[in-house]
Amino acid sequence: MSLWLSGIGVSRGIVIARVQKLHAGDLDIPERTLDAGDVDGEIVRFVGAQRRAREQLHEVRDKIPPGTPNDIAAFIDTHILMLDDRSISDTTIGHIRSQHLNAEAALRKTRDALIAVFEQMDDAYLRTRRDDVDHVCARILRVLLRSERQLPQKADAEPFVMVADDITPADIILLSQQHVAAFVTEYGGPLSHTAILARSLGIPAIVGLRDARRLLREGELVIIDGEAGHVLATPDDVALAFYRDKQQQQRQYRASLVKLKGRAAISRDGVHLRLLANIELPEDAKVAEENGAEGVGLYRTEFLYMNRKDLPSEDEQYEAYSRIVSAVSGPITIRTLDLGADKQVDSGRTLGPTPNNPALGLRAIRLCLKEPELFRVQVRALLRASSLGRIQIMLPMISNLQEFRQACAAIDAVRHELIGEGHRLAAQVPVGAMIEVPAAALASPMLARHARFFSIGTNDLIQYTLAIDRVDDEVNYLYDPLHPAVLQLIGRTIDAGVDAGIPVAMCGEMAGDPRYTRLLLGLGLTEFSMHPASVLEVKRIIMDSDVGRLRRAVRELLGCTELQDMRDRISALDA
Ligand code: PEP
Ligand code: MG
């Protein structure tokens, strides 16, 4: 008999293959009190296990095939850095020495304390690093306990669906070389590393499917729908025929997208829309253009500051920005660092005390204005790189005009300083505001008179507008890009930009989600910035759309007084 199961679909695609389970190998951690004479030996045992774990990760890294997206290797590098982090090693050695604990129990104590800190964090990205701590500590623990988790060794080339409690980035890389066709995990959310990596590698995945290992049988045939989050076990012939047909359609669709790479995103009625890429590492810039993006709409510079023990120097930043400029011929929007409160750097230097509501605290532009030297170093590097290409500077988390002006004055001061030193700079480096706080969207007509461009950050705009933490599972169901309040704020921001004659882009996830492309076109958006992998699909929709018709339809639907009526009309935009 067939069985339907539902989880969270995080990486699209239809797969029909047999189940292979990854056994949890839950770790049974013994606790012992050591004799004083055994303490030094235990520390040596811990350090040896740490070294072996590091070697294992280097072995995985060496197996990454050339041409794989850079964020894949970056996940492994994050784990290698974390392995060496003093908050893991020094604290564990401290527990062994002071409490005479065995290495396994000492490491568990360290891990539990670190996880508790990460779990309190308010930031989506950093909350996912809780999993990193867990994975890294589990790797050392497995070496200590001599309990390697065995990945299936596939001698044949038959694709399979890996069903597991959770999968580490390293395991994903190894499995991707073994004909894994899809992942189903019991834990994790849309922002988990399993999800991000699966998307990058183009492997369909479903996470958060509780009890998957109990409900699915080894070797059983299953259909995976990575978009809907559905698993259909032991499908009948009708279901098999239906999904085989769907699979075939998807293959043809993907093949047709590749042909759009060199083409401009021009709608049926002749409107040219600009498609840009969001990048996190300078190396991603090249991939962005290869995927058909016309430039970079968001470079998240905070990644330059994370996973390291010191702050990046001006020269190091200049070098990173120059690398992007040399790889991209189009415009490049570089966001000044969005760090602070919960996003502490690893240099041991805290960026202020951790407040109760970090998302509402000292972060992004607020932190830069409070720490002028931190900002100055970054702006010097940015302005110096401006002589090499089309750089524009974007300020995150702007909530009022005063803040924007203050930041512009600081940038101007740096410009004069550099000119005084004899540097050559671009004549114009446009400075724009990210609109991701509801107050900024409401005050956008005022901000538009001073900013040279806007970029709407829907990830934060939605969470602040609806007063929900986007990573809190309890309130996730309220996260709704189509909420009328959100649509009004987006519409107001675009209108303010148009009235003032400045470009308005969107760089939140909504911009790269094909379900919203027509709605955004109808709201008047002209620049879309997204993960490079989404560019071609959004381009296809744009090329099939009539922007004039969409603008009229969306203007009308925004006037709806019945929610269902509005939603029906939004769905009808795709017809
Ligand atoms: C956003 O908030 O939409 C955004 C793009 O910024 P981040 O996801 O980095 O907070
Ligand atoms: Mg944001």
Image: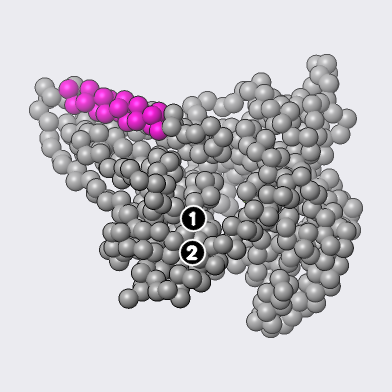
The magenta segment is: 41-60
Q: Residue 463 is drawn in which quadrant?
A: bottom right
Q: Of the residues shown, which amino acid type is indicated by label 2?
A: Asp
Q: Residue at 72% x, 82% y: name it.
A: 561
- Identify residue type, mark 1: Pro
Q: Is mark 1 within 8 Å of ligand 1?
A: no
- The residue positioned 69% from the left and 25% from the top of the image is 318
Which comes before the other along the chain, label 2 or label 1? 1
Nearest the viewer among 205 and 157 is 157
Quadrant, the C terminus: bottom right
| Magenta run includes residue 420 | no
- x and y percentages locating residue 56 in the rendered image: 34, 30
Residue 296 vs 573, above or below: the answer is: above
Number of labels in the image equals 2
Residue lying at 79% horizontally and 38% vertically, measured from the top left: 330
> In which quadrant of the rendered image does the N terminus lie?
bottom left
Q: Residues within 10 Å of mark 2 (few under 14, many from 20)?
A: many
- Which residue is the site of mark 2? 225
x then y, percent, for residue 529:
71, 49
Q: Nearer the viewer, residue 240 or 198?
A: 240
Mark 2 CB in 8 Å range of ligand 1? no
Front-lying residue, 37 or 532: 532
Q: Main secondary structure of the magenta part?
A: helix
Provide residue 373's location: percent of width, then percent of height.
66, 28
Q: Which mark is residue 215?
A: none
Quarter where residue 41 is shown: top left
Q: Mark 1 falls on what kind of element?
A: loop
Q: Nearer the viewer, residue 150 or 32?
A: 150
**Element at badge 2?**
strand
The dot on residue 204 is: 1
Report x, y in % for residue 163.
35, 56
The answer to whether marks 2 and 1 mark residues whose Cβ atoms lie closer than 8 Å is yes
